[in-house]
Amino acid sequence: MSWKFLKFLQVSSDWQYTGSFPGKMIKFEQTIFPVPPKPLRGIIAQSSSKSFPREIYRSAIFYFTEQNQIFELIPPDFVWSGRELAIKGLFYTKLYRWQIRIYYWEEREPSNIITPQQSTDIILSYGLL
């Protein structure tokens, strides 16, 4: 299990989309120049690349910070294929170079865990059944 790079964005006042990703944990690494006198804000939400017009789901405000931010995004109750992250800056985005590197947490099954089908295949191959 590890963080996998998803997208690099220059925050703007328009919605930007990351492309689909698995899982529900997202990490932001942010930089900004010049440093604003007050924290800048943006909106993070989930979206679907399969709907037109695009649907935005469970939006929340986020702030610029020099520390990494981790968000848990609960998937919608209904199934979306092509679920992706939507990001939009609020106010003054043209005055600053606000950049975000986005990562998602890739959850994998440990390699030493055997699925039921693999167990059956092993048993059959050794003639134990």
Image (cartoon, helix red, strand yellow):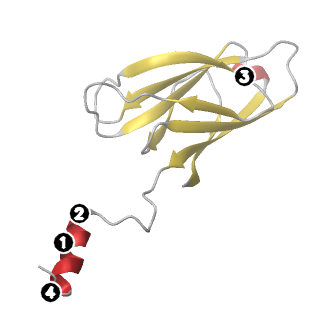
Q: Assess whether mark 2 and mark 1 are in contact (beta carbons under 8 angstroms).
A: yes
In 3D space, how far apart are the residues under numbered discs 4 and 3 (Cα atoms)? 69 Å
In the image shown, does 82 or 127 lie closer to the viewer? Answer: 127
The residue pinned by badge 4 equals 127
Distance from disc 4 to disc 2, alpha carbons, whole Å, reads: 17 Å
Task: Report the disc number at residue 43.
Answer: none
On the rendered structure, is 7 left or right of 17? Answer: right
Quadrant in which the C terminus is drawn: bottom left
Task: Please name the residue that numbered disc 3 is placed on.
Answer: 94
Which circle, 3 or 1, is nearer the viewer?
1
Q: Which callout, 4 or 3, points at the residue further toward the start of the chain?
A: 3
* Three-letter code for the amino acid on which mark 2 is drawn: Pro
| Disc 4 and disc 1 in contact, CB within 8 angstroms | no
- Pointer 4 local density, CA inside 10 Å: few below 14, some 14–19, many at least 20: few
Label at residue 120: 1
Separation of residues labelled 3 and 2 (CA atoms): 55 Å
The residue type indicated by label 1 comes to Thr
Which label belongs to residue 116? 2
